[in-house]
Image (cartoon, rainbow, N blue to C red):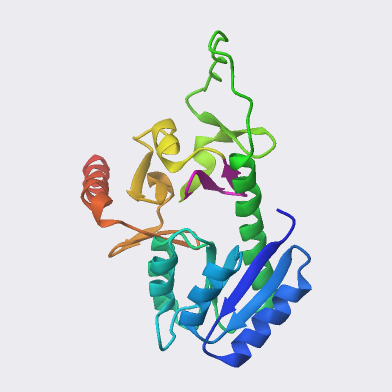
Amino acid sequence: MKTIRCLVVDDKPLALDILTDYIKKVDFLEFVASTTSALEALKLVEKERIDLLFLDIQMPELTGIQVMKILGEKCRVILTTAYTEYALEGYEHNVVDYLLKPIAFDRFYKAVQKAKQVFDLQQTIVAPTVVSSPKEEKPAEIPVARDIIFVKTEYKIVKLRLDDILYVEGLQNYVSIYTKTERILSLKNIKKMEELLPSGQFVRVHKSYIISLDKIDSIERNRIFIGEAVIPVGETYKDNFMHLIAQANSLS
């Protein structure tokens, strides 16, 4: 993708001006439009090709969360808000990032770099591939040692030590793997990652998250804290997760 086409939605004109100015400073972004109306934003997404939506959460007609539910997978979303309490709800919907107002340019640039990685990887996934002949043998599986795994990224296969992995975030048909030192985008989906990672060491806690039990700093209600990351615990996975925590306590 040469440029990422952007739409800005916020009921505060000043916020629109700031984000519009930021977008125009980044060469891989293309400013399409801005609006103070959530309803107008829905019309624009239907009419124009919008890749990335900068979306305020608190708006008078529809909330940003309601807009995301209506749009589904039509475009990627970066949420913008002055209220931290909406962060977990935003991540439930697989947003690219969550920007807290007032938004500094360096934080904005970090978010759009993340969006660029997502779009670049998505483009790789949907690119045409050569279909193998039925007579051809399947390629051999990469042998995996107990303490390492191999994951495919856009351009190479990367070896990861299991002990270095903090958590995995699912992004539709690919995942973001967070380690002690870096973040890696892999072509595996979260279900494949769940099958690849040893269950005694890693656990699925949400439809979009797998965590390393050993890397948990604390747990507060339905939230897990690993370093600076705050990871939600989904209702479907809560009982199994708490059972594993109870088991860990009994063994300590």
Residue 147 seen from this side = yes
Residue 85 is left or right of residue 49, and the answer is left
Q: Is residue 9 above or below residue 217?
A: below
Quarter of the image holding residue 194? top left
Where, by quadrant of the figure, is residue 138 drawn? top right
| Residue at 61%, 81% in the rendered image | 34
x and y percentages locating residue 124 in the rendered image:
64, 41
Specify whether residue 173 is painted magenta: yes
- Residue 116 lies, with reference to residue 159, above or below; the image says below
The location of residue 240, given as percent across then percent down, is 23, 46
Instruction: Residue 187: name its quadrant.
Output: top right
Please tell me which residue is depicted at 57% across the width and 49% down the height of the picture: 180
> Observer-nearest residue: 200 or 88?
88
Q: Nearer the viewer, residue 46 or 24?
A: 46
Residue sitting at the far front:
47
Q: How many labels sit on residues?
A: 0
The residue sitting at the bottom extreme is: 13
Residue in the foreground of this view, choosing between 191 and 85: 191
The picture places residue 4, in percent across and down from the top left corner, at 68, 62
Identified at 59% across, 84% down, the residue is 102
Find out whether residue 200 is within the magenta segment: no
Secondary structure of the magenta portion, mostly? strand
Q: Quadrant of the C terminus?
A: top left
The percent position of residue 91, horizontal first and vertical second, equals 43, 63
Q: Is residue 100 above or below residue 189?
A: below
Q: Which residues are magenta?
A: 171-186
User: Is residue 103 visible in this depiction of the protein?
Assistant: no
